[in-house]
């Protein structure tokens, strides 16, 4: 079966294949900044990263919306509008592994989400974390992006949202606790793993810091030195992207 056909299924083939990269570089799943919930995101983001942030990529499920619902979680509405005001128009883009994917028949969910949020939803063939080139194609057309470090990815999944930001060479914010009381077993499991993989050093966006972490799930060694991935000053080149 051809790879392009496999991407049509509900299975996240991109996530499965890219997870193997963690064997060589576990730091790909380390965020640059961690918040508890969407309401804790500092706006503007330049306050955190001391960088010229020009575009923001937003995850949907368990970030600003209840999983499987295509609307803003009401307690997060003010923060969402604050982000929209700080990053108007094409500078704010929703990238979900549900709405806007090939699982979303006719992109009906993406259209509902755009109507409910007023923000563009990316239509993408490859799911996160492998759709960085599709994101950049949109941003480079509509936003004055001169460096990948001018982009921030916000989401609740280390292995999709955070990993994608690091593969792109951009900044990341991990929304650790998501929607209160709405996490399933898998989400709670990854929060527990994430708590082991992160440290206070990850909460500061000024520069990469070396941290000592338990990596039994990645390596036979009990500990290993990891480095938070440094955002790139180079513009993203689609032809140089890793194939998934």
Image (tube, helix red, strand yellow):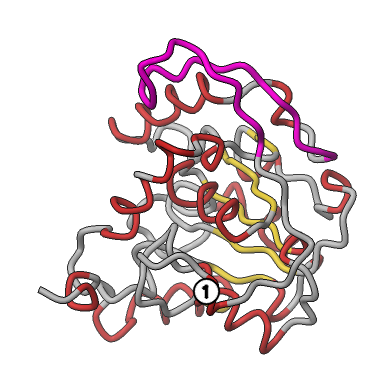
Quadrant position of residue 96: bottom left
Q: Quadrant of the N terminus?
A: bottom left
Instruction: Please report the residue visible at 58 percent of the width from the left and 82 percent of the height from the top.
Output: 137
In this view, 201 is above or below 156: above
128 vs 118, left or right, is: left
Q: Position of residue 157 (x, y in %)?
A: 46, 44
Residue range highlighted in magenta:
206-228
Q: Is residue 217 magenta?
A: yes
Is disc 1 surrounded by few (<14), some (14 to 19) or many (20+) residues within 10 Å? some
Give the secondary structure at mark 1: helix
Instruction: Please report the residue visible at 42 percent of the width from the left and 82 percent of the height from the top.
Output: 111
**Which residue has dot 1 on it?**
133
Residue at the extreme left = 1
In this view, 19 is above or below 120: above
Q: Quadrant of the C terminus?
A: bottom left
126 vs 173, left or right, is: left
Q: Position of residue 120 (x, y in %)?
A: 56, 79
Q: Is residue 239 magenta?
A: no
Instruction: Please report the residue visible at 29 percent of the width from the left and 50 percent of the height from the top.
Output: 16
Q: Position of residue 155 (x, y in %)?
A: 54, 49
Q: Position of residue 206 (x, y in %)?
A: 85, 39
Q: Nearer the viewer, residue 17 or 96?
A: 17
Residue at the extreme bottom = 141
223 vs 83, left or right, is: left
């Amino acid at each position: 079966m051809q790879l392009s056909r496999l991407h049509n299924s509900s299975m996240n083939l991109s996530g499965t294949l890219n997870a193997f990269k963690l064997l060589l570089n576990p730091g790909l799943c380390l965020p640059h900044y961690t918040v508890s919930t969407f309401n804790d995101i500092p706006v503007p983001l330049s306050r955190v990263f001391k960088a010229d942030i020009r575009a923001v990529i937003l995850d949907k499920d368990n970030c600003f919306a209840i999983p499987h619902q295509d609307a803003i979680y009401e307690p997060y509405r003010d923060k969402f509008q604050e982000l929209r005001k700080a990053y108007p128009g094409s500078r704010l883009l929703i990238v979900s592994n549900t709405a806007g994917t090939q699982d979303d028949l006719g992109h009906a969910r993406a259209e509902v989400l755009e109507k409910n949020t007023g923000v563009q939803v990316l239509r993408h063939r490859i799911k996160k974390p492998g759709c960085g080139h599709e994101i950049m194609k949109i941003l480079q057309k509509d936003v004055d992006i001169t460096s990948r470090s001018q982009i921030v990815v916000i989401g609740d999944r280390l292995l999709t949202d955070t990993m994608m930001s690091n593969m792109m060479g951009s900044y990341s914010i991990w929304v650790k606790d998501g929607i209160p009381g709405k996490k399933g077993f898998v989400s709670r499991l990854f929060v527990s793993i994430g708590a082991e993989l992160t440290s206070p050093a990850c909460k500061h966006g000024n520069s990469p810091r070396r941290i000592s972490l338990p990596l039994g799930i990645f390596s036979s060694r009990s500990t290993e030195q990891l480095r938070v991935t440094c955002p790139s000053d180079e513009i993203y080149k689609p032809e140089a992207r890793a194939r998934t």
